């Protein structure tokens, strides 16, 4: 019996030892998980701080002195220590953030980073490329969606062959005016940089382009109404059966698929848009929703614009879904009593812009190629 009691003690002690090891292992695992969660939280905090600092840099772009901006040979090699003596991004403690205006290869950038003061955890350096202001890009682009866009409503070209393309023209002062390829006013939350930026290198893409394009939404609507009042030519929805060229307004949507080219300025005031197959538009496409009213009774009020319900832009074959042609657009606009400079160059025409941010590029005169 005494031998059996001794064996039981050994078994109990062994089980206690195993339980202790399991408990210690669980504690170590929990501590590791806690550290990983803490590291992830810290990394998220500092990366958001870097974005906040970059936004501050964009906001203060007018005061940037590019003549004194340092030349950087390797943007990818920048670290927190390279930015900690920069401009304060005004993040809240325990997070701090800074930004700098720098140059690389003659191009301007904002670089920004954030750090948690107590732990020293720092973000990766965020790089924002700035596109200096140019003549043009004032009112509309080759393809413009004005107003809110319903979630999932926008179908963009799926290949480089069917992209939306910008262009250039020479104004009355002999200046070359750049026309942006694509402009969407609001509602970008459903779309990523990758799904939008590839449709054209001259696209000005921000969550709201009102700070970049020099006229407000209402001013753009007033310009369209002027054209409509001067030449209210309304095309049929199925443009394949009833093609319209020149200055064309559509009050029940626009559908153009298969093969062929629609020339001119095509403005959809209500309804869905579909340009597919090998079909394309040579000129300009403007899409908006006046609010479901009959066009003759519409208020043309920016505050009463409805959502763009559907815009499928995946046609064009090898030409491009919508592509700019200055001669075609000029002829179409003239029938509405509007010049190229009024339509593209800004509210007061196509004045030239410089590195100071002045000119037709809007309040700041800068386009932002990066995406948040």
Image: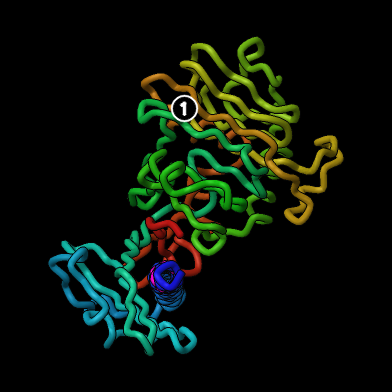
Residue 172 drawn at (x, y percent): 40, 48
Residue 80 drawn at (x, y percent): 26, 78
111, above or below 252, in the image: below
**Within 10 Å of the Cα at label 1, are there few (<14), some (14-19), or many (20+) other Cα atoms?**
many
Q: Is residue 169 visible?
A: no
Residue assigned mark 1 = 321
Q: Secondary structure at mark 1?
A: loop
Start-end of magenta stretch: 10-14
Q: Is residue 206 visible?
A: yes
Quadrant in the picture for residue 115: bottom left
Query: Which residue occupies the foreground of this view, 125 or 143?
Result: 125
278, above or below 309, in the image: above
Query: Which residue occupies the foreground of this view, 290 or 13?
Result: 13
Residue located 55% across and 42% down the image:
144
Quadrant in the picture for residue 43: bottom left
Residue located 30% across and 70% down the image:
125
Residue located 38% across and 41% down the image:
198
Query: Which residue occupies the foreground of this view, 116 or 299?
Result: 116
Quadrant in the picture for residue 228: top right
Residue at the extreme left of the image, as rendered: 73
């Amino acid at each position: 019996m005494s031998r059996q009691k001794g064996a039981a003690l050994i078994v109990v002690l062994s089980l206690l030892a195993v339980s202790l090891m399991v408990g210690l292992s669980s504690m170590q695992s929990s501590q590791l998980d806690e550290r990983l969660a803490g590291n992830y939280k810290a990394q998220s905090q500092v990366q958001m701080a870097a974005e906040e600092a970059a936004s501050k840099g964009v906001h203060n772009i007018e005061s940037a002195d590019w003549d004194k901006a340092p030349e950087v040979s390797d943007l990818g090699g920048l670290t927190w220590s390279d930015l900690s003596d920069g401009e304060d991004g005004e993040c809240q403690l325990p997070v701090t953030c800074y930004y700098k205006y720098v140059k690389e290869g003659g191009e301007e950038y904002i670089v920004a980073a954030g750090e948690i003061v107590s732990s020293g955890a720092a973000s990766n350096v965020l790089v924002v490329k700035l596109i200096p202001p140019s003549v043009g890009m004032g009112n509309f682009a080759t393809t413009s969606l004005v107003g809110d866009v319903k979630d999932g409503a926008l179908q963009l070209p799926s290949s480089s062959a069917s992209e939306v393309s910008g262009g250039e023209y020479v104004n009355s002062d002999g200046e070359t005016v750049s026309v942006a390829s694509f402009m969407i006013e609001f509602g970008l939350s459903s779309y990523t940089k990758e799904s939008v930026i590839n449709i054209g290198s001259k696209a000005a893409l921000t969550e709201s382009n009102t700070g970049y394009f020099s006229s407000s939404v209402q001013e753009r609507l007033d310009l369209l109404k002027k054209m409509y009042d001067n030449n209210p030519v309304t095309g049929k929805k199925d443009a394949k059966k009833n093609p319209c060229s020149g200055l064309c307004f559509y009050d029940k949507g626009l559908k153009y698929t298969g093969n062929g080219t629609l020339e001119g300025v095509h403005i959809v005031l209500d309804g869905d848009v579909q340009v597919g197959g090998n079909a394309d538009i040579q000129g300009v496409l403007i899409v908006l929703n006046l609010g479901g009213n009959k066009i003759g009774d519409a208020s043309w009020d920016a505050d009463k614009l409805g959502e763009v319900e559907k815009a499928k832009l995946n046609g064009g074959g090898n030409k491009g879904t919508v592509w700019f042609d200055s001669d075609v657009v000029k002829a179409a606009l003239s029938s509405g009593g509007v010049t190229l400079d009024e339509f593209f160059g800004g509210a007061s025409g196509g004045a030239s812009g410089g590195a100071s941010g002045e000119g037709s590029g809007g309040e700041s005169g800068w386009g932002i190629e990066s995406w948040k």
